Amino acid sequence: MRSAARAAGGRAGRLWPRPPSPGPGPPPPLLPLAMLLAVLLGGAGAQYSSDLCSWKGSGLTHEAHRKEVEQVYLRCSAGAVEWMYPTGALSVNLRPNTFSPSRRLTLCIKPLADSSGANVYLEKTGELKLLFRDGDHGPGRGRCFGFEQGGLFVEATPQQDIGRRTTGFLYELSGRRAGSDLHTLSAPCRPCSDTEVLLAVCTSDFVVRGAIRDVTHAPERQESAIHLHVSRIHRQKSRVFQPAPGGGWRGRIATLLECGVRPGRGEFLFTGHMHFGEAWLGCAPRLEDFQRMYREAEERGLNPCEMGVE
């Protein structure tokens, strides 16, 4: 919203003006071909990150009297933006080549620790909606929204001294449903239905069988950590679960503090997704309940995928 963005201390509600085009004048001297190519390639390289996943730059490259908007182009499903000495503004263009153009995507961003010096907005057709105010980077803070809702616009806030200030955030794109914040992408606190469990087994980043060793709580993050001893790994995209002394694996997964998770006896089937390097809990039925629902669906030919249940 225009009013919310203005309250954040930036020039929200309108795009930054481009520098005026120079008037007619004498034609520039011809450059040798090698020098011309070097200028063109150098200018293109300044707009792109070295690996097309992450970008790191400095506001000191801007001339103090020019209100420039620097274009940043990224082509990956996950990465980071880090802007030192922020001045002017950045327009971050995400065009991942790892997803089908017709697929609905969710974009999540999470500020880096101690990020400061700029506001981060969602921008579409010139309208700005505030996502993160300068310095708004609490532990576990993150926002998610539909990719079609707009791009990212980062505007430096007025500072007497820009020294030692860095604005930065992590981003990741996925095909999962969007929510208002990072936590809404995890499973709700209610138990999953049979259909939700069977689908989670097929689509989760990790699916493991194990028992709860302990549960610890972090009220400042509004999160709980479930510490597991895993007897079988059906799938894991990242090395969340590491070999444990005496056999099996161990690891931890996060969930919402409000869910009130407590240690419980018996074995469970834990599913979930990775967000910014952390494993988040999805559906977690008791093992015997999962085995029952899997066999019932198998008899009716309704299983979305196959896996060993013994």
Image (tube, rainbow, N blue to C red):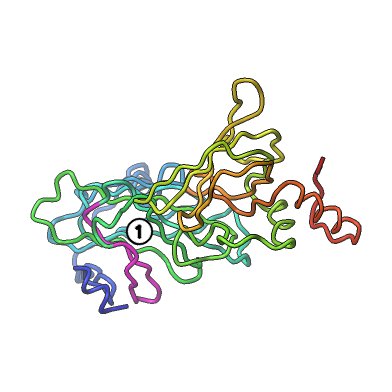
Residue at 64% x, 46% y is 270
Residue at 23% x, 52% y is 116
Find the residue positioned furthest to the left.
Answer: 160
Residue at 32% x, 43% y is 35
Q: Nearer the viewer, residue 86 or 171?
A: 171
Q: Is residue 147 above or below residue 97?
A: below
Q: Nearer the viewer, residue 212 or 5?
A: 212
Amino acid marked by disc 1? Gln
Residue at 37% x, 55% y is 141
* Residue at mark 1: 71
Image quadrant assignment for residue 198:
bottom right
Query: Horizontally, is 42 left or right of 177 in the view?
Result: left
> Which class describes the residues within 10 Å of circle 1: few (<14), some (14-19), or many (20+)?
some
Image quadrant assignment for residue 128:
bottom left
Find the residue positioned furthest to the top.
Answer: 246
Task: Give residue 285's position: percent from left, percent from top.
Answer: 68, 52
Which stretch did the figure color magenta?
116-132
Task: Give residue 259's position: percent from left, percent from top.
Answer: 51, 57
